[in-house]
Structure formats: structure tokens, C-alpha cells
Amino acid sequence: MHIPDGYLGPHTYGPAYALAVPFWAIASQKLNKTLRSRQVPLLALGAAFSFVIMMFNVPIPGGTTGHAVGAVLVAVLLGPWAACIAVSIALIVQAFIFGDGGITAIGANCLNMAVIMPFVGYGVYRLISARSEVTSPRRWIGAAVGGYVGLNVAAASAGLMFGIQPAIAHDAAGHALYAPYPLTVAVSAMGLEHLLVFGIVEAVVTGLVVAYLQRADVSLLYRSAEKTEKRSVAA
Amino acid sequence: MKATTKMWIGLAALVVLSPLGLILPAKLGAGSAWGEWSGEEIRKLVGYLPSGMARLADLWNAPMADYALKGQESAPLGVLSLSYILSGVVGVGMVTLVAVLIGKVLARRERSDAS
């Protein structure tokens, strides 16, 4: 889902940057209010986990590859604003050092994987886990479903970005200037592979880690889910 | 052992296992991710290289492009796997460093960790 340079025209990557910047600004403000020094290593761990899990390209035999992102997992541990920062850091390092995702597309990629994904996924997690006990199965189920939905909405958004290109920018011969596939093709290709394969991988990874933490150190989950929120409401 | 310590160990294990993300797609004949094709692949898929794409595609020359060292385009899978692990180490190191720096700047200080 890392959109490379050249797939989006300035008419898309420009506004995507413009949309991503306020999220980074608000996320910084929120973290400034709610992140405790003790949680900094967890933020780093989340960013590093997101980076590494994206290296695990899952193959569709004879077809394409894709991967989990980990954004919803970080959101469940530290909240969606921290996830926004953590995943953005991973994506920016991937773009500059490893050429994974374009420089011009950093805004677009962060919008998809570091904004849309953690917020949608976290919303689903909260909806399913509701007021259940921290140790309740509803927590890991909510996290798994949140991961699944979050990744799929992010993929659909990336598909949308790809898909609007040929309609917006083409030459006299009808050749696209940037990503060449039309909306229906782009959205259904990105949508299907994530609905059927990569979304499942994301759900399993997110659910497993949350289930593990429920047994190993429940405070890592609890703090983020309730206390941080009360604090930010009080602040 | 603290759960976070265990998670860092798990992360290190993931870095070591990361070449699976390279080897499995290669063995199962899976190509690029959708929408992440090279110029050559695009030409094969749609018959031409979009002009705007040609202009922007090589805008940035990443030092470890494709999680490999420079000039390794045709190296055997074993060598690529080692570079992949090295990329994981470099990437995790940089991401961690940046996250700690940003976290330190943003996090509010508490009496308990004023030391």
C-alpha cells in the first residue's frame, strides 16, 4: 500500500500533504498533553513494530504481495494519535532510506496508513470492546476486527487515490499521466486482496499481540483504553 | 521479565525472520504489490510508461532501495536475505531513534522519572 513516486499527480499528492499536516500537528499536541515519559519506549516499540511487520510481504501465489501495518495495534496500546505519530515515523523512514513509498506520496501514504487506519480501527475496537473488562475476549476480538476493518478502509482509500488519476490527468491520446488504472479496477483490486488476504493477516497479528498482552501485562492495554481518555477529557 | 522487554526480544526475532517476506513471495511467484510496479512492469501491463510517472519516479534515490544494498539487483536470494535483515536492523534503529527523540520532546515529565 506504499504509493511510490509517479503514481499520484501533484493535484493529489499536494492536497494529501495538506490533509496530513494538520493531523501531525494535532497528534503532536495531543501527545504533548497525554504521553507520559514512561510511555516513550512503548511509542518507539510501536513504531519499530510497524516498520518490521511491513517487511513481511505476504504473497498471493502467482499474484501480488501485501502486508500488515500494525497501526491499529499501536492505537489499542497508546491511542490513535500516538499511532498516527508512530506509523508516520515508520513510513517516512521507509520512504527516505528504503524507497518504499514515494517522497511525494508521504502525505498520501501517511493519510491512509497513519491516519485513516488507526482511527477507523480504533473506533471499531472501542465499539466492540465497549466497557468490557480489560481481560475480556471482547478486547482481542475488537482489536482483531479493528485491524481488519482499518486495513481495508486504508486500502480502499489508496485504491481511490490510484483510481482517480487517469480521469484527472491524461494526454490527448488518452494515456494516463500517472497511475493508469481506472477507479473501478484500482478500488476492486486493492479492496479484494485486502479483504481476502492481507486484512486477515492484520487481524491475526493485532488480535494475537493484544491477547498476549492481556495475559502478560494488562496495564499496557488498560492505561491507554481508559485512563488516557479520562485524562484527556479532564485536560 | 517485563512484557515490554519480551516485546523487544520478539521484535528482534521478527527482524531475523524478516527474509520470509522476501523468500516466500519469490518461491510462490508473487510479484510486486498492486500499484507498486517498476517502470518496466508498467510498460508491460498497460503498453506505455505514463509521462508524469516517468518524470517523478526517480525523484529520490534511496540509499537502501528495496531493502537491499546498492548494486545487488541480481544477487542470489541468500545474499538478498542478509541485506534484508541488515535493512531491518538499520530501519528499526532509525525508527526507534526518531520515535524516542520525538517522544522525549512531546512527553510530559513526571515526578517519578525526573531522575
Image (cartoon, rainbow, N blue to C red):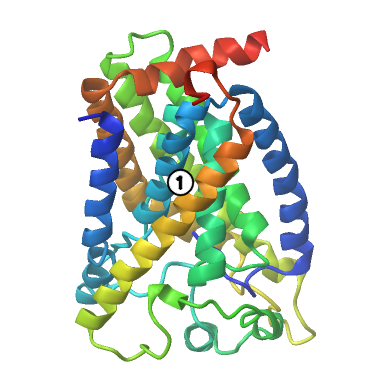
Q: Quadrant of residue A54?
A: bottom left
Q: Is residue A196 above or below residue A72?
A: below
Residue A127 visible in the current orientation: no
Q: Quadrant of the C terminus of chain A?
A: top right
Q: Which residue is mark 1?
A: A47
Count the marks: how many? 1
> Label 1 lies in what chain?
A
Q: Quadrant of residue A208?
A: top left
Residue A132 position within the rendered picture, expressed as x and y whole percent measured from the top left: 36, 9
Image side of residue A34 versus residue A214, left or right: right
**Residue at image location 43% in from the left, 12% down from the top:** A130
Residue B32 visible in the current orientation: yes
Amino acid at pointer 1:
Ala
Image side of residue A194 versus residue A228, left or right: left
Residue B70 position within the rendered picture, expressed as x and y whole percent measured from the top left: 43, 86
Q: Is residue B23 above or below residue B109?
A: below
- A7 and A102: which one is in front? A102
Residue projecting furthest to the front: B115
Residue B41 position within the rendered picture, expressed as x and y whole percent measured from the top left: 47, 84
- A17 and B83: which one is in front? B83
Pointer 1 local density, CA inside 10 Å: few below 14, some 14–19, many at least 20: many
